[in-house]
Image: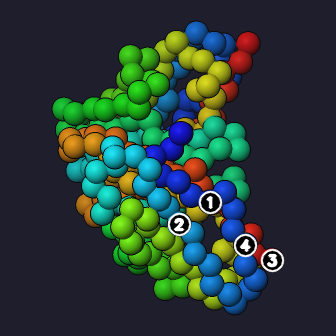
């Protein structure tokens, strides 16, 4: 069964750090670029970060550059998002998704909720 | 402000057809051929329904179709059904590098009357 399962969300205070994880199964994880996409409550989807299949290339949306770090462990079929200096604007459901061979996000996790609040 | 503009909402009656537009408003959205569309039901993750502007993944109903004219991509749903009520998001790749950046439209809420 092809799936992505996120974990690590929760409630954190502004300025703190948190790491999200995304466990992949049912497909060859190491063949695909992987992304994090977030969705603030009541809002649309927002692309956050991408990492190439071999972890050699990464890119981020402007508002998280320098604060978020995307990484992966292909031996564990797991994607990560290390987040620091969190602000209330980072409150969202965070999804991991793969970028497939035809240029689309075709596998999505169920999402993990991050709430940044004092 | 999103570089892809979608209407906030559309509505239609069962059996009718509706079209949702997705207009590029930024010159940063370079490889506009990689437009994809996603359906999202409340409390659920998005699912892919159209890729490369007009292709359907296996298992997606042929009532969903995509097209493009100039800087506007469109999603058409024919023969509306109650289960089509959802939010629809368009997405495109932007930037000149292989790993540039991706942008989503603001999402369109479809109401089946």
Which residue occupies 53% across, 54% down?
Answer: B5
Mark 4 or mark 1, whichever is nearer to me: 1
Q: Which residue is mark 4?
A: B11
What's the CA distance linking mark 4 and mark 1?
A: 11 Å
Q: Quadrant of the C terminus of chain B?
A: bottom right
Dot 4 falls on a residue whose secondary structure is strand
Q: Which residue is mark 1?
A: B7
Q: Is residue A60 left or right of residue B5?
A: left
Crowd tier of the residue under label 1, counting other residues whose Cα lies within 10 Å: few below 14, some 14–19, many 20 or above: some
**Dots 3, 2 in contact, CB < 8 A:** no
**Dots 3, 4 in contact, CB < 8 A:** yes
Q: Earlier in the sequence, mark 3 or mark 2?
A: 2
- Asked if badges 3 and 4 are on one and the same chain, I answer yes
What chain does badge 4 belong to?
B
What's the CA distance linking mark 1 and mark 2?
A: 7 Å
Q: Residue A96, position in %: x, y?
A: 46, 43
Q: Earlier in the sequence, mark 3 or mark 4?
A: 4
What chain does badge 2 belong to?
B
Disc number for residue B113: 3
What's the CA distance linking mark 2 and mark 4?
A: 13 Å
Q: Earlier in the sequence, mark 1 or mark 2?
A: 1
**Dots 1, 3 in contact, CB < 8 A:** no
**Dots 1, 2 in contact, CB < 8 A:** yes
Which residue occupies 43% across, 55% down?
Answer: B24
């Amino acid at each position: 069964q092809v799936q992505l399962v996120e974990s690590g969300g929760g409630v954190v205070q502004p300025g703190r750090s948190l790491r999200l994880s995304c466990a992949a199964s049912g497909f060859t994880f190491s063949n695909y670029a992987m992304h994090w996409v977030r969705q603030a409550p009541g809002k649309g989807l927002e692309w956050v970060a991408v990492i190439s299949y071999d972890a050699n290339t990464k890119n981020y949306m402007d508002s998280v550059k320098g604060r978020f770090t995307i990484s992966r462990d292909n031996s564990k079929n797991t994607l990560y998002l290390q987040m620091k200096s969190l602000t209330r604007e980072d409150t969202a459901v965070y999804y991991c998704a793969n970028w497939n061979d035809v240029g689309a996000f075709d596998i999505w996790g169920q999402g993990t909720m991050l709430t940044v609040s004092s | 402000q999103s570089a892809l503009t979608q209407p906030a909402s559309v509505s239609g009656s069962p059996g009718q057809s509706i079209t949702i537009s997705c207009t590029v408003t930024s010159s940063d959205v370079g490889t506009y051929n990689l437009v994809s569309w996603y359906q999202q039901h409340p409390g659920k993750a998005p699912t892919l329904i159209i890729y490369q502007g007009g292709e359907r993944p296996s298992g997606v109903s042929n009532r969903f179709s995509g097209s493009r004219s100039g800087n506007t991509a469109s999603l058409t749903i024919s023969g509306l059904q109650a289960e089509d009520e959802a939010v629809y998001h368009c997405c495109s790749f932007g930037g000149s590098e292989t790993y540039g950046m991706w942008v989503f439209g603001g999402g369109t809420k479809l109401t089946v009357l």
